[in-house]
Image (cartoon, grey):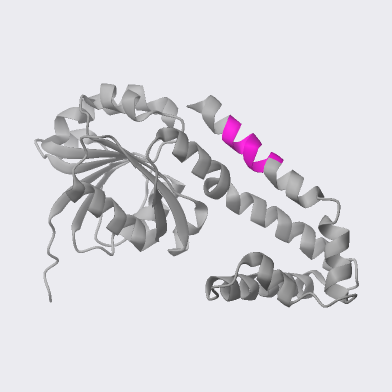
Amino acid sequence: MVTKQTSHKVLMVGCGKMGGALLEQWIKSDKLDFTVVDPMAESLPEGARLLKDQDALKNEMFDLIIVAIKPQLIEKVLPSYSKRLNKDGLVLSMAAGFSATGLGEVMETDRIARIMPNLPSMIGKGVAGLFAMENVSQTYRDLLEDMMELAGTSVWVDSEDGLDRITAVAGSGPGYVFEFARTYVEAAESLGFSNEQARDLVLGTILGTIEMAQGSNETLETLRNNVTSKNGTTEAGLNALNQDGTVTRKLKETVDAAYNRAVELR
């Protein structure tokens, strides 16, 4: 058996739905050795150690502490973990609405980074935002990129406002897409298809179209025009969908509303 070589001891505080989804991807790295403290967790991916209480850590220290608890629990739960962070270690938070500055005060360090992942991280297809305070080393920035690559793709931002904007587009985005798909399926059913048939038609169309777009150098506008014949069925459908700019306007209102709420929470 090949021994797993690790270079960073990682402590994850809490392991809810998103934390567990990311851990499923991160555990694949040979650079990370995971310990999770969560009194509610029943199981973890193979290779991660689960503890129910911080006291079981005894005198252990960690290079990376990942904050995966609800924001409202941070000031109550996290302060006692500050003594667990190595001198040059990093605190990484996935808690929405709790600032890096606030985390720094709780953990008594200026080496804080935040991530804003989205739901498809569960299958390694996520899109995440990354923000790090000035004193976070390039070594740790590279490590964060490697970690998020296991869960999908990532985008660095230079402010926490940037994370709020990513939340509005990508963090909340799966909800928008699910809602579009849901109403698209209903429209297909109105033409006489069963729910199963409509779902297959709609999701297959969306998946194939997205894969075509990802594999093309053409703009989305050009790709749309390529499938739209003059006076044809697609043109008729598009005119009904967005000729008066309704979809354009509603999507702008959607991301603006999500962004404004993210700012309020912070």
Q: Is residue 35 left or right of residue 244?
A: left
**Which residue: 23% across, 53% down?**
143
Front position in the image: 191 or 228: 228
Tally the numbered discs. Answer: 0
Establish if 153 lies above or below 87: below
Q: Position of residue 107 (x, y in %)?
A: 24, 27
Q: Position of residue 163 (x, y in %)?
A: 45, 39
Give the prevailing secondary structure in the magenta stretch. Answer: helix
Q: Position of residue 182 (x, y in %)?
A: 74, 58
Establish if 259 lies above or below 1: above
Q: Is residue 80 left or right of residue 211?
A: left
Q: Is residue 217 visible?
A: yes
Q: Quadrant of the N terminus?
A: bottom left
**Which residue: 25% across, 63% down?**
29
**Which residue: 28% across, 51% down?**
144
**Residue 255 on the magenta segment:** yes
Establish if 93 lies above or below 212: above
The answer to which image quadrant residue 134 occupies is top left
Residue range corresponding to the magenta coloring = 253-260
**Which residue: 74% across, 50% down?**
248
Q: Position of residue 58 (x, y in %)?
A: 11, 36
The answer to which image quadrant residue 220 occupies is bottom right
Q: Is residue 75 left or right of residue 200?
A: left
Front position in the image: 30 or 102: 102
Front position in the image: 259 or 109: 259
Q: Is residue 193 visible?
A: no
**Residue 44 on the magenta segment:** no
